Amino acid sequence: MRIFYKALICLSLFFSLTSKAQIVETFYEDGTLKSKGKVVVVSRKSTIAGKQTLSLKIGLWQYFDTLSTLIKTENYAKSGNETFLNGEVLYYSGEGVLLKQENYRHDVMTEERWLDTGIYEFGNLRIEFVRNSDKNLEVREYRNGELTMEKLQENGQITLKKSHRKFSRGVNDPPKMFESNRITEIEIGKGETLESKL
């Protein structure tokens, strides 16, 4: 009976340690802060990969440009062994102007609002928010310097003007604009593991 209780205590200790949120920061090559937020480490079984241990984003995540300016915030929620976008995602220009607000519920965008003109840049993504001659907001999205999508906001409605991105099946498919909810070694740093950063 004592072995059973010891095993139960060890098991509950294991679950409390693995489900505790930990703060993680990622950095650009020059040491400037790139992102910060919390992760929760979860284990789950997969029929293909067997048992997996994942570090998933949870709560508020903040992203910064190379000049340390806040350019994006995301909110993640947890249900079981999964996390998902839930709540506001805000996009800022390099000057700190709030450009765009998205609302999510369980990874599904429920609302998108463009608020001002400016440029959002992060990694290989550049989004330009401009006013056209009719005083409506237009958005041009570039990936790796190539125009991939154009949208128009007219009378509060956002419509896709043109997608310039072709995929292998020949289908125009606008890419998602939020970060993955998983933390990878590449994001953490060369040769480092998540555990070495915690």
Image (cartoon, grey):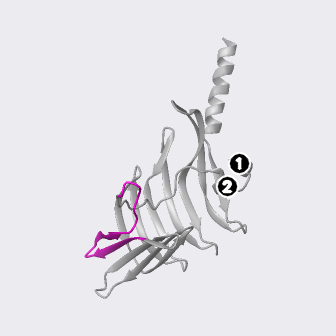
Question: Tag count in the figure?
Answer: 2
Q: Which residue is mark 1?
A: 193
Give the amino acid type for the residue marked by disc 1 in the picture.
Thr
Is residue 165 highlighted in magenta?
A: yes
Give the amino acid type for the residue marked by disc 2 in the picture.
Ile
Which element type, helix, strand or loop, lies under badge 2? helix
- Decide if residue 107 is on the left or right side of residue 94: left
Q: Is residue 179 above or below residue 41?
A: below
Q: Is residue 37 above or below residue 136?
A: above
Is residue 138 highlighted in magenta?
A: no
Percent coordinates x, y for residue 107 in the rendering? 41, 52
Cα separation, mark 2 vs mark 1, equals 7 Å
Image quadrant assignment for residue 136: bottom left
Percent coordinates x, y for residue 159 in the rendering? 29, 69
Q: Quadrant of the N terminus?
A: top right
Residue 164's disc is none
User: Alpha-carbon neighbours of circle 1 within 10 Å: few (<14), some, or many (≥20)?
Assistant: some
Image quadrant assignment for residue 37: bottom right
Q: Which sits in the foreground, 184 or 36?
A: 184
- The residue lying furthest to the top in this view is 1
- Decide if residue 171 is on the left or right side of residue 20: left
Percent coordinates x, y for residue 49 in the rendering? 56, 34
Percent coordinates x, y for residue 164 in the rendering? 38, 69
Residue 188's disc is 2
Residue at (69, 15) in percent of width and height? 3
Q: Is residue 76 above or below residue 33?
A: above
Q: Earlier in the sequence, mark 2 or mark 1?
A: 2
The magenta region covers: 148-170
